Image (tube, rainbow, N blue to C red):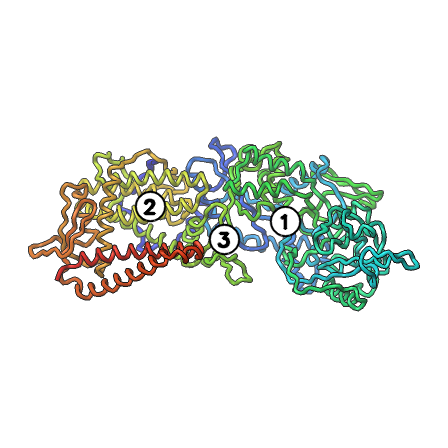
Amino acid sequence: MTENTQQQPASTPELPTQYAPAEVEGKLYERWVERGYFEADAKSEKPPYTVVIPPPNVTGSLHLGHAFEHTLIDALTRRKRMQGFETLWQPGMDHAGIATQNVVERELAKEGKSRHDLGREAFVERVWQWKGESGGQISGQMRRLGDGVAWSRERFTMDEGLSQAVQTIFKKLHDDGLIYRAERIINWCPRCLTAISDIEVEYQDDDGELVSIRYGDVEGAAQGASDTDGGGRRAGDAIVVATTRAETMLGDTAVAVHPEDERYKHLVGREIELPLTGRRIPVVADEHVDPEFGTGAVKVTPAHDPNDFEIGQRHGLPNLAVMDERAVITAHGPFQGLDRLEARSAIVAALRAEGRIVAEKRPYVHSVGHCSRCKTTIEPRLSMQWWVKVGPLAKAAGDAVRDGKVKIHPQEMEKRYFDWVDNLHDWCISRQLWWGHRIPVWYGPEGEVVCVGPDEEPPSGEGWHQDTDVLDTWFSSGLWPFSTMGWPAKTESLAKFYPNSVLVTGYDILFFWVARMMMFGLYAMDGTPPFHTIALHGMVRDQFGKKMSKSFGNAVNPLDWMDKYGSDALRFTLARGANPGVDVPIGEDWVQGSRNFANKIWNATRFALMNGATVEGPMPSPEQMSATDRWILSRLNTVVAEVDAYYEDYQFAKLSDTLFHFAWDEVFDWYVELSKTTFMAGGEPAKVSARVLGEVLDVTLRLLHPVVPFVTETLWTTLTGGESVVVADWPTDSGFRDEAAEREIELVQRVVTEVRRFRSDQGLQPGQKVPARLTLDGTALAPHEGAIRQLLRLQPEGDSFHATATLPVAGAEVALDLSGTIDVDAERKRLAKDLAAAEKEKAQATAKLGNEAFLAKAPDNVVDKIRGRLAKAEEDIERIAAQLANLPQG
């Protein structure tokens, strides 16, 4: 263990009788910031430890998931700072293109205006104004939570420096042939009026319809008929296709069948009638078609479906767009001007009237894509957009993990990562928005296309104009690990703090953000990945495991729980539930329990200070210590080693649970209680134990600090007189172990635990004193008789002592005189009734488990449950029989 070098004040420090988080948290945090504890010096010779914050969207406030993630990152960085690293936790926010534009447009709508009323420049000014007014909310919440971020380095993805980074990498990718412009099918949101990427589409099962439509000769016979009409068409020129989007048939330019499908071979290369349009479309053979699915024929709408677009490209089919950007029908005819859903119903009705509907199924449940921002149903749309050719970038991102340059934790998440990066499609990066990084491309009057870097003058003159689109938000946030440190300039910060030590983030944005950072980091930084480790955590859910959502009514504002229970209580609850890659259920009663833990730490430290606990002077030698002292120091070193191992493995739940049980159970409930008799006796043993207790509290508070920073700061500075636990040394395992002392105290714990259980079984109140005779001679328990009597409320036996119950335990014997303390007859009747019930339960379970017919049919879980009932009944019988045997004899 690291020995504290601070000096304790000469006078005995005092603490208020109760811990009041609201009175101390804000003041402590501002003191930490003022003293510059969280700042990072690029000139420092200390080893670096860097973590970037997953930048929250400027649109909102921190939710419980943010509080969870920030708690984990803060714990890591606080520990590393104490270990002597030059620690940078990089803060900042994301401009969140679509989300922010939507928020400001809603504000304008309240004024009866749209962004078009303002114009682009004025609208962007309005967004910056909104950002200035609302952006501080997140910073305030981070301070409340205790986030130890380097505030002087705070960045925003639309800052001038970060905008320069965006232009630089766009230009580099463009010049390297990795950015191009092409007309492709994209995911279009008719509400946000922009393209969105595949990973911004949320799929859910919706109730829709499946309509089977006969194309071609409506009166046609079965396929293969050979009769022809006067126009040379066969009477069997009809094919049935099924669709969930009947409105798109207006844009069909073919019907596709499999080349080997005998049912349609006679039609391949021919044209059939497209209902309601007056057009004729070809039948094409394409291996994409599954002949076993449905009728084995599919309608082809190249301008409104990604698979159809590919078929169209292979067969040279025209791309016929029949909807505008708001998903309103533009095709000439009776359906023009109808919304897509209105058109769907009208078209099906018209087809039904012509006798072309073969079958209709409603509801037809199928997976439908929705905009992740506004939840509007996505419309696949053919559009000219900018794309990133991700092939070589994604390969590098995959290889970095395969080669061990980057570790994913937990390792089982690697498969999910590889499944994604190994199968990436080119990334649509242009968005039809006004808020964001505008694409740095200019178009000339003669069709010129010029990509402009940050240090280049854009072309000017008549007819020149800049692309009106902006970049996908994930494009700029993908640069976050190095753009925040001044790239493309070769800054001291970049040299010192890149790459990041670890990325702590949710598995849900492994594809959105993590893969983008990997691709861009490796590309821009000469093959150096943006971080050494990707530590993935799960999602915060309610106490029933249900996703938290405002619509479900179970969303929690973390500020509410911090106001009620204190920030430490919320942080400890979140950390204690954080198993790598696993979702975290949380309920208010758990936060209340963590508040009780903070109070326990406070009260125990206050008691220790009142009894002289100190860090002054050297530690006593083991020879000067009692077995109790040596036991707690041995356990303390073991816990230091365990906590370190858990931190290195990102096992926040295990390290928090280890510290909880060590502090509450071993330090407060055992060591402090066992030492009370020593403190009361005074003398040299009391001084030794006071120094040991001071050491144990000093180290325990330092171990707890990264997770519960506020209460530990108050207690540690009071105990030690030190400047701040934030900059105190992290404890190290000194290697001290005393197995003999640990075994000795384990015997004491066994005696106390067994007698306490017996007292409880006999209905004795915890504080009720009972005469007892302890036979401890010849055992390791002898030196602890005073402490055992104190803990068990056992009085000396006295002259009239009559042993009515004797408990042999741990090689010793505890005889109790319960005369007059309980109603023996009533207790014997109660226990006899309980014993009969347990024996009946055992008989029933035994009978079922002995029934071969039952065992052959019953599910495994049912059989296991009955085995559990049998084991429980047998335990109850043994326990109750022992209680009856120990009752005083009348």
Q: CA distance from mark 3 to mark 1?
A: 21 Å
Q: Residue at point 81% right, 41% down?
A: 448
Where on the picture, by quarter, is residue 220?
Answer: bottom right
Tell me residue 273's x, y (percent). 84, 58
Q: Residue at point 52% right, 53% down?
A: 62
Earlier in the chain: of badge 2 and badge 1, it is 1
Q: Quadrant of the N terminus?
A: top left
Q: Residue at point 43% right, 54% down?
A: 860
> Label 3: which residue?
540
Q: Amino acid at mark 2?
A: Phe
Label 2 crowd (10 A; few <14 / some 14-19 / many >=20): some
Q: CA distance from mark 2 to mark 1?
A: 44 Å
Tell me residue 529's x, y (percent). 58, 35
Q: Amino acid at mark 3?
A: Val
The kind of secondary structure element at disc 3 is strand
Whether 538 is drawn above or below 104: the answer is above
> Quick one: 38 or 73, which is closer to the camera?
73
506 vs 172, left or right, is left
> Label 1: which residue?
199
> Quick one: 855 or 333, which is closer to the camera?
855
The kind of secondary structure element at disc 1 is helix
Inspect this view and state whether residue 129 appears.
Answer: no
Label 3 crowd (10 A; few <14 / some 14-19 / many >=20): many
> Label 2: which residue?
662
Tell me residue 639's x, y (percent). 35, 41
Label 1 crowd (10 A; few <14 / some 14-19 / many >=20): few
